[in-house]
Image (cartoon, coloured by chain):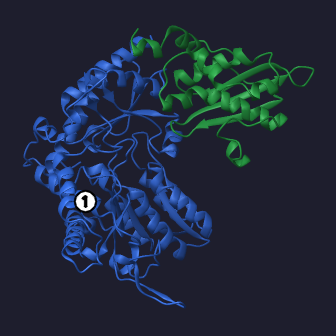
């Protein structure tokens, strides 16, 4: 993660005071929430924005001519503009609201993939993918006769790009789909290089930014991506809203994903014509209040500053790796601290992650135990599951200390 | 006793460290593989019937999982040896839970019952006995 030396320092204790979830104890202990990679906690400011929207401006959007409908429409479209600025997208019509990054990728896999893939074509994913950027492509490849290929990992948990030529020899590379940050190992992937490679092969580049957008600046133009998927809930926004950015020239030629209300231009018995972008891809009533909350979350993150967030998480990851490497019997997965986001996956020799997580919970520490929706990666690592501690802007060093203390208890129980 | 001591009580840890019936039967008269999609735990169950072709003469399990799933399956091996396929098929899961006797959250309940569910699937495949609750009616494909 690029750490700017001029970034203002983030005071996590101050940030934390904005998050009401921390005003409670779990099993009589302070809450150490180390599962932000699964979903982040919520600042008061975001919740207040949603409440204000429901209290003063709620009505269905894009239809009514009355004041409330106009306010609601302005709020939704204002949120869309905030997402555009966040991603540095050229045009706000390229921002499609969806439920989450999974839905965004499905939209691309169906609307683009079903109509552009066939036998002889290749969809290239990585061994690091979350199921959300793996299963849709596997499914659509299966339906269209295209093949799925994987960029493998090296021993450090980083993509082995020396395999690209041999992958390209297997067929016509039509799609390259990868995440920017691995939700499981925290690996920061060389996505600009992969975007260039995808285009050299005549393919499109689809970026799952669900795990990167909460923590670092994602500039769709600088990255050279064709589609970028993000989830609001991982970046201080509410659940139920995410966004897809797509290159306008591609989106405008694509068939709709879901059909029904709102996404039409005109409906006749013999023929329906699709609405303009982005409405063609937004069938049904939009997640309006959620989008407003998403916009407020983006404001919140911008106020703290993405450089400061990235630097803070980098510091925490380095601290955690340092402290945890002293624990006997621990295996730490993934790249060195300077090339990873605030995620530490680990196993304790002979103790199943479920048991580790359960005992940690009794110490007030929330981590994730399981396959992290990355079963191909788990197969590569030769394990069924790992423990994962992940950090965000409100994470404080004391929580990592609580984790390390909890792990000592775990080892005692299984000694 | 704290919640903590209750969950990881001595007998659970004993079964986990020294599981009963751990291994593989090849050939087996009945066999099934089960997975817990929530955590990726896997268990395979192997059954050998006695001369009547009905009574469980020997039962083994292999796979990997957390202490709760491994200990529960280990206890299950003791519980079902000598019972008939029909008896096991209708074995109330509460009987196993009583044996485990620890407080279980809904997620950990799935860990605790993975072995029993898989055993019932094995017996269903070999003997046509009823499937466990929640699986009945589902496509066979899901049972592997």
Q: Secondary structure at mark 1?
A: loop
> Mark 1 sits on what residue?
A218
Callout 1: chain = A
Is A188 left, or right, of A295 in this rendering? right
What is the quadrant of the N terminus of chain B in the image?
top left
Q: Residue at x 54, y 22 (%)?
A: B68
Front residue of this view, candidates A8 and A2? A8
* Colour green maps to chain: B
What is the quadrant of the C terminus of chain B in the image?
top right
**Residue A261, located in which quarter of the rendered image?**
bottom left
Q: Residue at x 83, y 37 (%)?
A: B128
Is residue A139 visible in this depiction of the protein? yes
Front residue of this view, candidates B73 and A46? A46
Question: In the rendered image of this protein, does residue A218 appear above or below residue A1?
Answer: below
Is A237 left, or right, of B37 in this rendering? left
**Chain A drawn colour:** blue
Front residue of this view, candidates A171 and A383? A383
Q: Residue at x 61, y 30 (%)?
A: B114
Neighbour tally class for label 1: few under 14, some 14-19, many 20 plus, Cα within 10 Å: some
**Residue A371 horizontal/vertical position (percent):** 48, 39
């Amino acid at each position: 993660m690029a750490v700017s030396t001029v970034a203002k320092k983030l005071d996590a204790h101050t940030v934390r005071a904005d998050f009401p979830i921390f005003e409670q104890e779990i099993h009589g202990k302070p809450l150490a929430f180390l599962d932000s990679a699964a979903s982040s906690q919520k600042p008061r400011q975001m919740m207040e924005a949603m409440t204000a929207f429901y209290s003063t401006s709620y009505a269905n959007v894009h239809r009514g001519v009355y004041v409330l409908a106009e306010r609601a429409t302005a709020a939704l479209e204002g949120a869309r503009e905030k997402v555009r600025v966040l991603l540095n997208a050229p045009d706000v019509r390229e921002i499609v609201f969806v439920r989450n990054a999974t839905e965004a990728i499905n939209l691309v896999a169906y609307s683009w993939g079903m109509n552009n893939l066939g036998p002889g074509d290749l969809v290239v994913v990585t061994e690091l993918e979350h199921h959300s950027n793996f299963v849709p492509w596997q499914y659509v490849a299966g339906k269209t006769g295209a093949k799925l290929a994987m960029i493998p990992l090296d021993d450090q948990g980083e993509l082995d790009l020396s395999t690209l030529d041999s992958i390209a020899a297997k067929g016509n590379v039509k799609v390259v789909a990868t995440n920017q940050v691995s939700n499981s190992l925290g690996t920061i992937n060389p996505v600009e290089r992969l975007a260039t490679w995808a285009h050299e092969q005549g393919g499109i580049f689809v970026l799952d930014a669900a795990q990167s957008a909460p923590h670092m600046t994602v500039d769709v133009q600088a990255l050279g991506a064709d589609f970028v998927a993000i989830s609001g809930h991982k970046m201080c926004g509410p659940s139920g809203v995410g966004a897809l950015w797509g290159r306008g020239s591609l989106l405008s030629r694509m068939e709709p994903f879901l059909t029904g209300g709102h996404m039409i231009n005109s409906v006749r018995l013999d023929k329906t014509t699709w609405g303009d972008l982005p409405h063609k891809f937004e069938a049904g009533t939009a997640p309006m209040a959620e989008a407003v909350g998403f916009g407020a979350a983006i404001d919140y993150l911008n106020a703290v500053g993405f450089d400061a967030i990235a630097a803070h998480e980098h510091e925490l990851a380095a601290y955690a790796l340092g402290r945890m490497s002293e624990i006997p019997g621990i295996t730490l997965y993934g790249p060195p601290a300077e090339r990873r986001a605030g995620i530490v996956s680990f196993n304790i020799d002979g103790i199943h992650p479920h048991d580790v997580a359960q005992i940690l919970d009794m110490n007030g520490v929330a981590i994730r135990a399981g396959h992290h929706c990355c079963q191909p990666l788990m197969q590569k690592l030769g394990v069924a599951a790992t423990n994962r501690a992940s950090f965000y802007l409100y994470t404080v060093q004391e929580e990592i200390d609580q984790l390390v203390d909890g792990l000592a208890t775990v080892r005692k129980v299984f000694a | 006793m704290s919640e903590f001591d209750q969950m990881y009580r001595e007998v659970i840890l004993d079964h986990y460290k020294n599981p009963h019936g751990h291994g593989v039967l090849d050939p087996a008269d009945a066999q099934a593989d089960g997975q817990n999609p929530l955590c990726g735990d896997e268990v395979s169950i192997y059954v050998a019937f006695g001369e009547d072709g009905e009574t469980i003469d020997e039962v083994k399990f292999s796979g990997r999982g957390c202490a709760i799933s491994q200990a529960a399956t280990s206890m299950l091996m003791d519980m079902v040896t000598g019972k008939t396929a029909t008896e096991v098929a209708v074995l109330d899961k509460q009987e196993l839970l009583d044996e485990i006797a620890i407080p279980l959250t809904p997620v950990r309940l799935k860990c605790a019952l993975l072995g029993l569910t898989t055993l019932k699937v094995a017996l269903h495949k070999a003997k046509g006995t009823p499937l466990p609750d929640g699986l009945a009616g589902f496509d066979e494909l899901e049972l592997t």
